Amino acid sequence: MKFTRPRLPYMASDLEPVISTTTIDYHYGKHEQAYIDNLNRLIEGTEYEDMNLEEIIRKSSGGLFNNASQAWNHIFYFFQFSPKGLKEPAGSLAEKITEQFGSLEEFKKKFEEAGATIFGSGWVWLSCDDKGTLYISQGSNAENPITSGLTPLMVFDVWEHAYYLDYQNRRAEYLHRLWDIVDWDVIGSRYNF
């Protein structure tokens, strides 16, 4: 198999109480593994077999795109968290957030609103363009800003499987609590301006 599910940089229990061990085991363990298994099956013997994951996302459609993008999205999502990470942005990212949104608090409010108002399943993204301008966007299903030429910086998963075991239908509470485990050092390392 070409693609594998990377080991998380923390223990499954380390994000509690924001994300439970049960959710990590189900969401990253079983759900993410299914996307990777499907992706490997779908690329076997095709032109996509030798491409990296970002190339597959840019060039594919249908079921292949859905599995490739969901595999990438989940890794990106889980690897931005840390139980002891930097709690606020620093450097050029902090400056840009303040410049564009007025404050970190106002940015968080807009980001949470974007996540709470997605109808159905999807993702809420913070991305930037090649000039460093920041964008908050909603993505339905497996949508990813890579396909629009943007660089993803941060994402919150708003598929029900991401939060239902821990928060039931309280999506807004889940989105608000994620700030407690976001590692802004990771997010800042993705912003190269």
Image: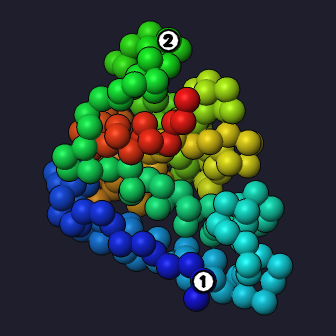
Q: Amino acid at mark 1?
A: Lys
- Up-down relation of residue 187 to residue 38 (above or below): above
Q: For mark 1, give the secondary structure.
A: loop
Q: Amino acid at mark 2?
A: Glu
Whether residue 38 is visible to the viewer of this picture, yes or no, is no
Give the x, y percent position of residue 24: 30, 65
Image coloring type? rainbow
Judge by depth and name the residue closer to the eye, 187 or 15.
187
Whether residue 16 is visible to the viewer of this picture, yes or no, is yes
- Up-down relation of residue 53 to residue 76 (above or below): below
Quarter of image, res 50: bottom right
Q: CA distance from mark 2 to mark 1?
A: 42 Å
Quadrant (top left, top right, bottom left, bottom right) of the C terminus:
top right
Q: Are marks 2 and 1 in contact (CB under 8 Å)?
A: no
Give the x, y percent position of residue 112: 42, 31
Judge by depth and name the residue closer to the eye, 158 or 92.
92
Please state if 90 lies on the left or on the right of 126 as rendered.
left
Give the x, y percent position of residue 151: 62, 42
Counting the numbered discs, the total is 2
Identify which residue is drawn at 67% across, 60% down.
54
- Up-down relation of residue 167 to residue 52 (above or below): above
Please tell me the numbered disc located at residue 44: none
Identify which residue is drawn at 36% across, 72% down.
7
| Label 2: few (<14), some (14–19) or many (≥20) C-alpha neighbours in 10 Å | few
Please tell me the numbered disc located at residue 2: 1
Q: For mark 2, give the secondary structure.
A: helix
Identify which residue is drawn at 38% across, 66% down.
27
Please state if 99 lies on the left or on the right of 68 as rendered.
left
Mark 2 lies on residue = 99
The first of marks 2 and 1 along the sequence is 1
